[in-house]
Structure formats: structure tokens, C-alpha cells
Image (cartoon, helix red, strand yellow):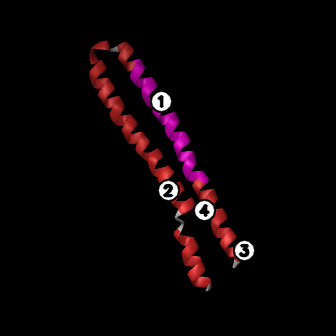
Amino acid sequence: MEQGLATIISAAQIGAAIALFNGAFTTFGQAKIVAQAIESMARQPEATDDIRSTMFIGIALAETSGIYGLLVAIIMLFANPLVSIYINFVS
């Protein structure tokens, strides 16, 4: 029983770490969005308002992915349903 539970918890921790890598990659994506928006604003100053609003929408969509990764990691670490299923199965 101890070894099976340790395996489930270890797998959950590895999965949470992988889910948190999503946040790091989201940061790089947002930096790319902002860099391209600034470059576009420098080339076309008259379209600054449109570019800025599109940039904010893009950043919000990219941030959603990072938030989902964080949510999955928190669930896997603190509210893992597999632990209770395993305990009910063994006992």
C-alpha cells in the first residue's frame, strides 16, 4: 500500500512540474507578442490604438493557458482524486 501511494504522489508531482512549465512557455509567448506589437507601433504610429487593443487580446488569450497550467498543478498537488480512489481500492 505504501509503495503504490508513493508512486501516485510522485507521478502527481512530476505531472504538476510539467504543468508549471506551461507558465514558463507562456511568458516567452507573451514577450513575443509585446515585442511584435512594439515593432508594429514603431512602423505604423497611426495604427497604435488598433495594435494595442489586439495586443491586449493576444496577451489575455496567452495568459489563459498559463492559468490553466497553474490550476492543473494545484489540483494535482493538493486535491488529487487518485489518492482517495487508491485508498478506497486497497482497503
**CA–CA distance between discs 4 and 1?**
31 Å
Looking at numbered disc 2 in the image, what kind of residue is underneath it? Val
Where disc 1 sits, the SS reads helix
Pinpoint residue 64: horizontal percent, then vertical percent: 41, 45
Q: In which quadrant of the rendered image does the C terminus lie?
A: bottom right
**CA–CA distance between discs 3 and 2?**
24 Å
- Considering every residue shown, the one lying at the far right of the view is 3
Asked if the residues shown at circle 3 and circle 4 are in contact, with their CB atoms under 8 angstroms apart, the answer is no
Looking at numbered disc 1 in the image, what kind of residue is underneath it? Lys
Measuring 43% from the left and 30% from the top, which residue is drawn there?
33
Pinpoint residue 58: horizontal percent, then vertical percent: 37, 35
Where disc 2 sits, the SS reads helix
| Mark 3 or 2, nearer chain start | 3
In the image: residue 89, left or right of residue 68: right
- Return the mark for residue 72: 2
Was residue 26 drawn as part of the magenta stretch in this picture?
yes
Measuring 39% from the left and 35% from the top, which residue is drawn there?
59
- Return the mark for residue 3: 3
* Region in magenta: 17-39
Write down the residue under mark 4.
Answer: 12
Looking at numbered disc 3 in the image, what kind of residue is underneath it? Gln
Write down the residue under mark 1.
Answer: 32
Please tell me in which quadrant of the rendered image residue 77 appears. bottom right
**CA–CA distance between discs 2 and 4?**
10 Å
| Mark 1 or 3, nearer chain start | 3
Tag nearer the camera, 1 or 2:
2
In the image: residue 50, left or right of residue 39: left
Foreground residue among 40 and 15: 15
In the image: residue 64, left or right of residue 22: left
| Mark 2 or 4, nearer chain start | 4
Where disc 3 sits, the SS reads helix
